[in-house]
Image (cartoon, grey):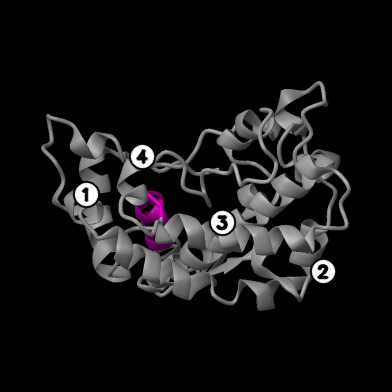
Amino acid sequence: IKKIKMNIKNYKKLTQKCYKIVSSPLQTHDLAGRFLLSEKFKEEKCKVFFSADGVDELLGGQQVYLKTFLKKYDFSNNMSPYSSIQNNKLLLRGKDNFLKDYLDKKWQETLKHYSFIKSKRERNIQASLFLDYFIQSINVANRSNDLICCENSVEPRNVYIQKNILKIILNLPLRYKINEKVSDIRFRQKYILKKVFSKYLNKKNILPKTGFSGFPNELKDKNYGKSKILNKILKKSPIKHTRALEWKIINLEQFLKQFF
């Protein structure tokens, strides 16, 4: 396992490069790390590498999921912070609340495809996980990764975009994704993936989730000054983002029909 050191200064430089390549607000603060990895692969004369983008959404691995989905709440609403608007004054301002209405509508469409599940809680969570994945996979796993890595003439191939794999995962019962009842807390998220991993490799290598490399908060640190790149990202119009999002997920219904 190779480790590559990153500091704030280098992160800022890489982020500026990524912004020029993607030509839009960055879909994840990890793009700088992906760009750096593709550079390292290029140095090793590798042409292709495999990634696992979307696995945290598909199998409930995001850190916020366990805490959010264990709460008692109204199961008629999408509670995932990744595909819903919750108490965000900036995005909720205005009369039409277009982005909130649009995401709510898409979540309801997804929910219908899980109507065969009796549990309201499980239907709710399954729909949230899938909508999170669909938005993330288009903006990050497909568009951003491809642009960022191919800039270094290296092709990223995502395992979790193949139809046969997706069909299995989307129809898995929730307990194989998020299982809060298992005694080993490391296995409570992405449960089935970690069980398969531990069957062939030492489960000591299953570590707590630590997030991605990057310094999104430190970009505003007083010692470095407010980043111009961060200013560009923050000052983009929410309406422009909304129209881009609408274009990205407009074919959600057609996409869903392939798997249910």
Q: CA distance from mark 4 to mark 1?
A: 22 Å
Label 1 sits on a secondary structure element that is: helix
Q: Earlier in the sequence, mark 2 or mark 3?
A: 3
Q: Earlier in the sequence, mark 1 or mark 3?
A: 3
Amino acid type of the residue that numbered disc 2 sits on in the rendered structure: Phe
The span picked out in magenta is 28-40
Query: Splitting the image into 4 quarters, where does residue 25 fall?
Result: bottom left
Instruction: Say left or right for 233 vs 252.
Output: left
Identity of the residue drawn at 86% across and 41% down: 199
Q: Is residue 55 above or below residue 182?
A: below
Q: Earlier in the sequence, mark 1 or mark 2?
A: 1
- Chief secondary structure of the magenta portion: helix
Q: Which residue is mark 2?
A: 260
Amino acid type of the residue that numbered disc 4 sits on in the rendered structure: Lys
Q: Which residue is mark 1?
A: 230
Q: Residue 4 at what x, y percent from top left?
A: 40, 43
Q: Which residue is mark 3?
A: 104
Magenta span contains residue 32: yes
Label 2 sits on a secondary structure element that is: loop
Q: Which residue is mark 4?
A: 5
